[in-house]
Amino acid sequence: MEETIRISGKDLGAIALADFCPRCFWVKLHSKGQLPYQIFPGIFSSIDAYTKRVIHAWFDEFHTPPPWLKGLNDVIGYKEPPTYHKFNTINDEFGINLTGSPDGVFVRSDGSHMIIDYKTAKFTGNQDNLHPMYEGQLNAYAYIGERTGLSPITGLALIYMEPVTDDKTAGHAQNRRPDGFAMPFAANVLPVTLDPTILHPLFKITRETWELSSPPPQLSSCKNCKKLNDLIERMS
């Protein structure tokens, strides 16, 4: 194996999406994930971090998960989630350095762990077209965790924090403050199947794509490729 490929759990999981574009993936791999003109609003990271602090504070005070986290009755505590500096592992078969940073790690009553990812978004359940990516991402985190001190991992879940923005809620007096306003969030827990076997084909595609000397054909419906092709055509 030549060069070790570094890839995040989320980027690995994105291969499973129905609209996965091999050409875009090749470009992203060879740009080390640093695509130009890509801006992710920091507010979502701030909300996810605040969600974590609220949940941890509840555990610290009551030693039980908040009542709005239904379905987590066997959870008795948490661990501070590791950062990507320590949360990474090498897949020797394909020469891939898999990295990540889970939003949350819960401790279950039997001493095992559940890995959590917070989503600030409307809850649509399994119909969410991004679910295959999240499933791959969380299973990638489980893969890393089993090899970096979180073993055993027995559960995965997405926690959707959905903003409540209807007219009635906006008019509630308790949501008005002298320095601004408060926005409530409704929580929905979606268990994710723990299945490490789904990662092998994703590792394989990553290595095969990396080894290509030029970009593979694009997905015919890829909007980003179409924009790039249109730009190249205008410049030629």
Image (cartoon, grey):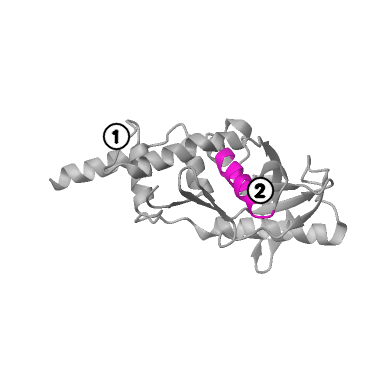
Magenta part of the chain: 135-149
Is residue 82 rendered to the left or right of residue 55?
left
Report the residue at 19% width, 45% height from top. Answer: 232
Vertically, is 76 above or below 21? below
Would you place residue 78 above or below residue 165 in this image?
below
Toward the left, the furthest residue is 236
- Secondary structure under the numbered disc 1 in the rendered image: loop
Q: Residue at x 56, y 62 (%)?
A: 85
Residue named by callout 1: 217
> Which of pointers 1 and 2 lies earlier in the amino acid sequence?
2
The label shown at residue 146 is 2
Identified by mark 2, the residue type is Glu
10 Å crowding of disc 2: few (<14), some (14-19), many (20+): some
Counting from the top left corner in percent of width and height, residue 42 is at 52, 60
Q: Secondary structure at mark 2?
A: helix
Asked whether 105 or 111 is in front, the reply is: 111
Q: Check the image and report above or below for 191 versus 178.
A: above
Please tell me in which quadrant of the rendered image residue 35 appears.
bottom left
Q: Residue furthest front?
A: 1
Q: Nearer the viewer, mark 1 or mark 2?
A: 2
Mark 1 neighbour density, 10 Å: few (under 14) some (14–19) many (20 or more) = few
- The percent position of residue 39, horizontal first and vertical second, equals 42, 56
What residue type is disc 1 on?
Pro
Q: Main secondary structure of the magenta part?
A: helix
Residue 142 colored in magenta in the image: yes
